[in-house]
Image: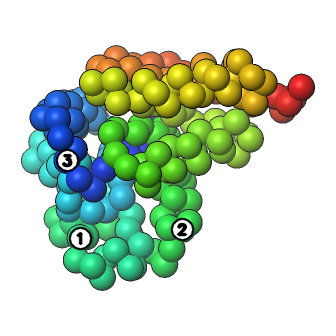
Amino acid sequence: MNSIAVFCGSNFGHMPEYLQLTKILATELVNRNIRLIYGGGAVGLMGAIADEVLLLGGEVIGVLPEKLAGAEIAHKGLTELHVVKTMHERKALMAELSDAFIALPGGIGTLEEIIEVFTWTQLGFHQKPCGLLNINGFYDKLNSFLLDMSKNGFLSEYHFKTLLINEDPADLLNELENQKIIYQPKWIK
């Protein structure tokens, strides 16, 4: 893995562990020589992970829609910043530049981004692993919901198990590096 897209909040959240583990993930990325691909912002956990990777000497590529760049949230010190027209272009470019995906805690944008690339895996648009950094159980309810989808026949057990969930950044990266996604064209029963 050379590059990982990290989806995360433009806020810090209410628990200090969100920021602490974001910085630990940044350290792990740099130690493994993995380039960070992210949303290009200078605010919240987005800005924090970019700042930490850059501070440690790593590479950071941001992808930001024009509308948000115009709102002056663009990070000014990145290795590269791609300004695109739309959110759709942003997600497509982030996916193209990345070998895997991680969602940290965040809001509905973070949720939408990780679910979209997870869906693309299920549909065979790519074979890149997806993971959730489950800080303080942040994604427990999502995991439970996805399990219910699987039990009720709307998500195959195979695809449910391909979404990796771990509370430790190093362990999650290890799992992502070892994950092999196999397209299952007959996932509908």
Quarter containing the N terminus: top left
Residue that numbered label 3 is attached to: 12
Residue with the most extreme bottom position: 70
Q: Which residue type carries mark 1?
A: Ile
Q: Which mark is residue 73?
A: 1
Q: Rounded to the nearest whole Å, what is the CA distance between mark 1 and mark 2?
A: 18 Å
Q: Where is residue 182 in the image (x, y as percent from the top left)?
A: 71, 26
Q: Which residue type carries mark 3?
A: Phe
Q: Which residue is drawn at 50% across and 50% down?
A: 113
Q: Residue at x 72, y 28 (%)?
A: 155
Closest to the observer, 146 or 86? 146
Residue that numbered label 2 is attached to: 89
Q: Which mark is residue 118?
A: none
Q: Rounded to the nearest whole Å, what is the CA distance between mark 2 and mark 3?
A: 25 Å
Which of the two labelled residues, at mark 1 and mark 2, occupies the earlier sequence position?
A: 1
Query: In the picture, residue 181 is in which quadrant?
Result: top right
Categorize mark 3 by other alpha carbons within 10 Å: few (<14), some (14-19), many (20+): many
Q: Which residue type carries mark 2?
A: Glu
Quarter containing the C terminus: top right
Q: Residue at x 20, y 59 (%)?
A: 43
How many numbered badges does the structure rendering display?
A: 3
Q: Which residue is drawn at 34% across and 23% down?
A: 137
Tag in front: 3 or 1: 3
